[in-house]
Amino acid sequence: RYSLFYKRLKNIEENEGGLDKFSKSYKTFGVNQFVDGGVYCKEWAPGAEAVFLTGDFNGWNPFSHPYKKMEYGKWELFIPPGQDGYPPVPHGSKLKVVIRAQNGELLYRISPWARYVVRDEDKVNYDWVHWNPPQSYIRRHPSPKRLKSLRIYESHVGIASPEGKIASYKNFTYNVLPRIKDLGYNCVQLMAIMEHAYYASFGYQVTSFFAASSRYGTPDDLKEMIDVAHSMGITVLLDVVHSHASKNSEDGLNKFDGTDSCFFHSGPKGTHQLWDSRLFDYANWEVLRFLLSNLRMWLEDFGFDGFRFDGVTSMLYHNHGIGTGFSGDYNEYFGLHVDEDALCYLMLANYMTNLLHPECITIAEDVSGMPALCRPVVEGGGGFNYRLAMAIPDKWIQIIKELKDEDWNMGNIVYTLTNRRYKEKYIAYAESHDQALVGDKTLAFRLMDAEMYTNMSVLSPLTPVIDRGIQLHKMIRLITHALGGDSYLNFMGNEFGHPEWLDFPRKGNNESYHYARRQFNLADDHLLRYRFLNAFDRDMNKLEERFGWLASPPAFVSEKHESNKVIAFERAGLVFIFNFHPYQSYVDYRVGIETPGKYPFFIYKILLDSDAPEYGGHQRLDHSTEYFSEEYPHNYRHKSLMV
């Protein structure tokens, strides 16, 4: 793998002047304004017979501005400035690339490199709008230094409001970012930013890779949002979709030059049978240029600090992981079934971002467990900084759905939370957007279900269902946070147990926005129990910020007691003790420890208690109690506490 990567890198250096120049192609491809007022246009359309530029600027004459054919399927056009010195293609004017296909048909296309596309309310397809404002947004704040550990708030701009509408970048900037900061998250991961014609695709059917979604506002609005996040010390990651592309041709990449290949594999190999989308040809030189330039544009033009790569499992294997169960056996990861071209692209992407932006963070969404995916490229690894611990949310769902409380297996919980590849960093999460989508259920909804509609008021009696749900919601999130990995992720709204599911406007729900929103007002209402979960999530994050357990070595688990339903472990100088027993509490319970406690009295004190009243608990513990460590070995630890 490293030899293939090195060969590709060497070719780029010899033929393109290096990765730096190669990945700057977004500055020359598409339609770009020159300093002297002229416009330079460049496209890659190997299957085209002829290429033209048309639009508002020439009265939509399809043939007045032909491109010149270059080598390797490239086409270029230079339009000089007007006599008055003004640019020939004004800011805000609509454009189309006109392709004469091999069969003579004229195709009106949006440039794959378009930076801004919009859709009028009365239209189905998007229009390409030339974005070249007289004064672009100027960043005021530097990006934060790379964090030792991430507390990620997974977000979607369009649903980030209690109102039944598509929310804006401005709304997120001024209403949501302060909330994220207050909750103790130091990183926001933005979904559905790359333009996608179908809103209900959650941003995963991308049509314009270089355009920020216009349904939330302008590119400058997004730049301001990222800049304000940086002023708060918040790192901003983009959910990047390079695993596939929308099948749209009128306003997407598909059949751009009239052929079914161009950016994609031709024939069945170029279509994902489950997602009904197109699959990139990662061995193609111009595809590498397109995708690497895309990453660089988001980093340098918008100020993103890194990426969460979606659908990595689909990229890694020729069968895209469909119908495949991965056991961890090495034969599953090395062989002809692995798409080495796709893996090589990921290595190039990580190598480039790290070379040009050493503070950049990359995360892999891989369910297969590909070895060394998060090891440096020079070791033959994939080069990612983190991978998602995708088995954890599945385990919590399985436990809640299938097991009675008294049948919860402590050893199995610990195994799932600690089962990760040596020296590869994992992002733990109890649930993400996947569990919030219609057809699935969030943890809160699984735990409390219909009673969330009637019994979440503090004025109503605390029913057993609500009581159990609130307590387990906190415990599941804390043990995942503390034991499950090297960083932590939460999907927006789930921190306070957002009720119901997430469903975008579509024909099946009469185009309703009722479920395409986040009801932050529920967490702000002091008469509702959602505020207890919100407060616990905030204080859990603030405690991690203080002690840094995510950046500490893995925890030492001293106890996973099946009959007592107790799990105890140490990490970052703290002792975590969880009692998952449905009805049994314990007095004078001995817990093994290694660190003697706070000098000079060798004591421990409670720092976070899920049973505290401010978190909707029953206040059964006295927080003024001091727990003295004893020179009494217990559970393979040299000392112990009685709690």
Image (cartoon, helix red, strand yellow):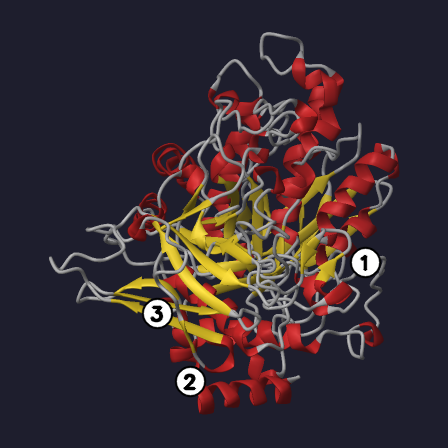
Residue placed most toward the observer, 152 or 190: 190
Q: Which mark is residue 18?
A: 2
Q: Residue at x 61, y 37 (%)?
A: 200
Instruction: For marks 1 and 2, give the CA distance.
Output: 36 Å
Mark 2 or mark 3, whichever is nearer to me:
3
| Residue 8 image offset from top left, x and y in percent | 56, 85
**x then y, percent, for residue 62:** 41, 56
Q: Residue at x 57, y 69 (%)?
A: 384
User: Mark 1 touching mark 2, by CB under 8 A?
Assistant: no
Task: Point out the image quarter for the C terminus.
Answer: top right
Amino acid carrying mark 3 in the image: Leu
Question: Which dot, 3 or 1, sits closer to the camera?
Answer: 3
Does residue 622 appear in the picture of this structure? no
Real-space CA distance between mark 3 and mark 1, rounded to the nearest whole angstrom: 43 Å
Q: Is residue 626 left or right of residue 509?
A: left
Residue behind mark 1 = 322
The numbered mark, 3 or 1, whose residue comes first in the sequence reads: 3
Disc 2 residue type (three-letter): Gly
Do the residues bearing badges 3 and 1 touch, measured as CB atoms within 8 Å? Answer: no
At mark 2, the secondary structure is loop
Crowding at mark 2 (Cα within 10 Å: few <14, some 14-19, many 20+): some
Dot 1 crowding, Cα within 10 Å, few <14, some 14–19, many 20+: few
Instruction: Name the residue located 60 percent from the left edge and 56 percent from the top edge.
Output: 571
